[in-house]
Amino acid sequence: MELRTVAGAKAKIGIGRLLVFVIVGGFAFSVASVAVHRFLPVPITFLMVQRIFEGKGYHHEWVPASRISDNLKVAVIAAEDAKFCSHYGFDMNAIEKAQRNNARGRKVRGGSTISQQTAKNAFLWPQRSYVRKGIEAYYTLLIETMWPKSRIMEVYLNSAEWGPGIYGAEAASQYWFGKSADDLTQAEASRLAAILPSPLKWKAAKSGKYVKGRSGKIRANAGVVRRNGIGTCVLE
């Protein structure tokens, strides 16, 4: 009996040590990966790999923020996260609004900020789950602590999905408008921002009525962003 007790105690100690190792290792890896990508491009994401296996291809060209039009930076702030420059990763009002919508059985809304979307796109898998959302919140805090806002926007614009197999602002600009990302007009930038919620369903060029209407609202809101200096943290 004593031998069994000792063996059981050793097994528990072994499991405990393994758990500590996994936790410490995971923490060290996450901090190191965020630190590295503060300076280096994110070459490929989990979503990109998934889409490759789905047969949608892979078109991605990383470009620095200086080669992406300010029109697009302002447009995505207007469309996705008006408080991007002032919050610390989370927009609590948007989250509460999303929770109320979902509780009433309306169309599911995430309330995710650009920072949260960047954390998910760059480091995590795309499927929704409470586990992923929890890890996403952790990575959001990491990038908000270790990266400037301009870097968060740069990674976001270079990793976002903008069509079947189309990732990042440069590939999206070439695919939809046949030009470089630094040449996007306000109207074109608004079209790209408009399709972000459903890039496999909506088109930035030769758009349908809904996308045209949505892009018009985004362009108007982008004007407000510019006039009120809401997007100064990412403008060149």
Image: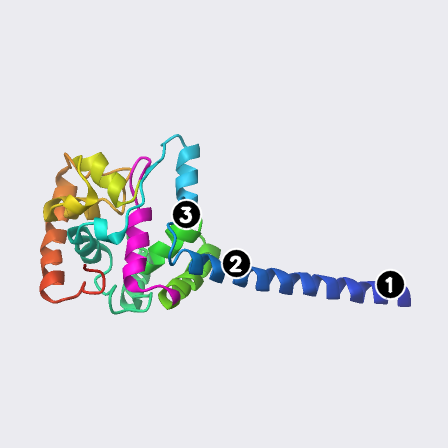
Percent x, y of residue 41? 37, 50
The kind of residue tagged 3 is Pro
Percent x, y of residue 42? 39, 49
- Eye-nearest disc, 2 or 3: 2
Q: Nearer the viewer, residue 202 or 104?
A: 202
- The magenta segment: 146-166
Quarter of image, res 101: bottom left
Residue that carries the numbered disc 2 in the rendered image: 29
Q: In the rendered image of this protein, does residue 95 appear above or below residue 45?
A: below
Residue that carries the numbered disc 3 in the rendered image: 126
- Eye-nearest disc, 1 or 2: 2
Per the image, label 2 sits on a secondary structure element best described as helix
Q: Quadrant of the C terminus?
A: bottom left
- Count neighbours of disc 3 (C-alpha within 10 A) and say few if under 14, some if 14 to 19, many if 20 or more: some
Residue that carries the numbered disc 1 in the rendered image: 4
Q: In the rendered image of this protein, does residue 50 appear above or below residue 31?
A: above
Residue at 11%, 67% (x, y): give it: 228
For marks 1 and 2, the one nearer the N-term is 1
Per the image, label 3 sits on a secondary structure element best described as loop
Cα–Cα gap, marks 1 and 2: 37 Å
